Amino acid sequence: MKLTVIIPAAGKSTRFEGPVSKLEQDLGGRPVLQRTVEVFSKHPEVDHIIVAGPHEGFEEFKVRHGDKLGLLGVTLCRGGVTHRWETVRAALDEVPEDSTHIAVHDAARPCVPLDLLERVLEAASKYPAVIPAIAVSDTLKRVSAEATKDVDIDPLDAILGDAGKTLTDVRRVEATLDRANVMAVQTPQVFEAEILRRAYAQSDLTSTDDAGLVERLGVEVTVVEGDPRNLKITRPVDLELARAILKVKMKGDDKPLHKRF
C-alpha cells in the first residue's frame, strides 16, 4: 500500500466562537492543525500528506503553517472557495500517481488513537472503501427542518409594555428513529485511489463526507469500529475535551512509533 493522506483545512470555523480559527487554537503547545498532521507523519505506512488550506488567505496560511508542516513532510495546496468537496478535489490533483490508497481526514480531529488508525488501515488493505464509525447511544428524533423563535411573555411585562424575552430556537419532533442500525461516522476514511478519483469525477459532488460520493458509484463501504476519543473540534467545549484527551495520550496511551521525517 502506498498511502496519501488528504487533510482539508479550508473551513471557516463558523461554529467555533472567537476571533481565532479552531485549527489555530493551542493544543498542548501546538496548533490543532499541527497535532492532526502529526498523527499521520509519525505513522510508517503513510507516504504523503497533503494539507489543503483556505482559498482566500492561502499565502497567510502558508506563512503561519508552512515551515512547521514542511518539517513533517507536508505538501500544501490551495483549497476550494465554498464547499469541502472543492477542497478535497483540489488536493486530489496533488496526490502522486503511484499512490494506491487515499485517506481523507478532518483537520479538526487531532486525537485519533493509534489503534483506530491501524484498524482502518488494516481493513483498507482488504476492502476498497473503509470508514470508522461509532454506535449512537442517544435517542434520535427527526425534527422540523426550520426552527422557530419561542417568546416567553410575562403578564407583568405585557402590562408594562415589554414585548417579552426571546428564547432559543425551537423545532418540532416529527418522528423517533430506530438507532439500531445508525452509526456516527468519523475519519480517516480510506479508499483505493482509483475509486476516490472516480467518485470526484461525478457531476454531483454534494455530500457530507467522501464515503457518500463513493457509495453513489455502487462501491460497498466497509465500516470498522471508531473511537469516542476521535472527536471533531466544532465548538469551544470540544477543544477542552481534546486537551484532556491529549494529556492522557501524552502519558503513554499510544505506543511509540518510529518517525518517518
Image (tube, grey):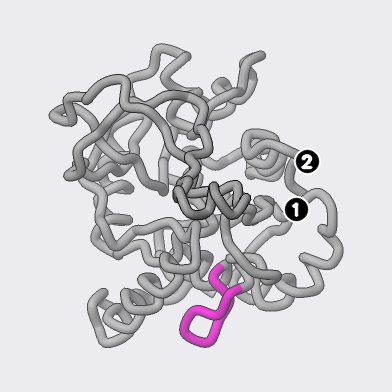
Q: Foreground residue, 66 or 244?
A: 244
Any mark on residue 54, and which?
A: 1
What residue is pinned by disc 2?
Answer: 81
Q: Position of residue 14 (x, y in %)?
A: 64, 53
Residue at 63 percent across and 72 percent down: it is 24
How many badges with numbers are in the image?
A: 2
Residue found 86% across the figure and 63% down from its top: 59
Q: Is residue 85 magenta?
A: no
Give the mark, 1 or 2, whose residue is nearer the N terminus.
Answer: 1
Assign the N terminus to one quadrant of the image: top left
Give the residue drawn at x 58%, y 27%: 197
Magenta residues? 25-32
| 171, 209: nearer the viewer | 171
From the viewer's perspective, is 3 left or right of 248? right
What element does badge 2 sit on? loop
On residue 72, the disc is: none
Where residue 76 sits: x, y (%)?
72, 58
| Residue 179 vertical position relative to residue 18 in the rendered view, above or below | above
Whole-Å distance between the Cαs marked 1 and 2?
7 Å
Q: Is residue 123 left or right of residue 103?
A: left
Q: Amino acid at mark 2?
A: Val
Which is nearer the eye, 106 or 16? 16
Query: Compared with residue 25, is residue 115 higher up or lower down, i.e. above or below?
Result: above
Amino acid beneath label 1: Pro
Splitting the image into 4 quarters, where does residue 91 fall?
top right
Give neighbour class at mark 2: few <14, some 14-19, many 20+ (Cα, 10 Å). some
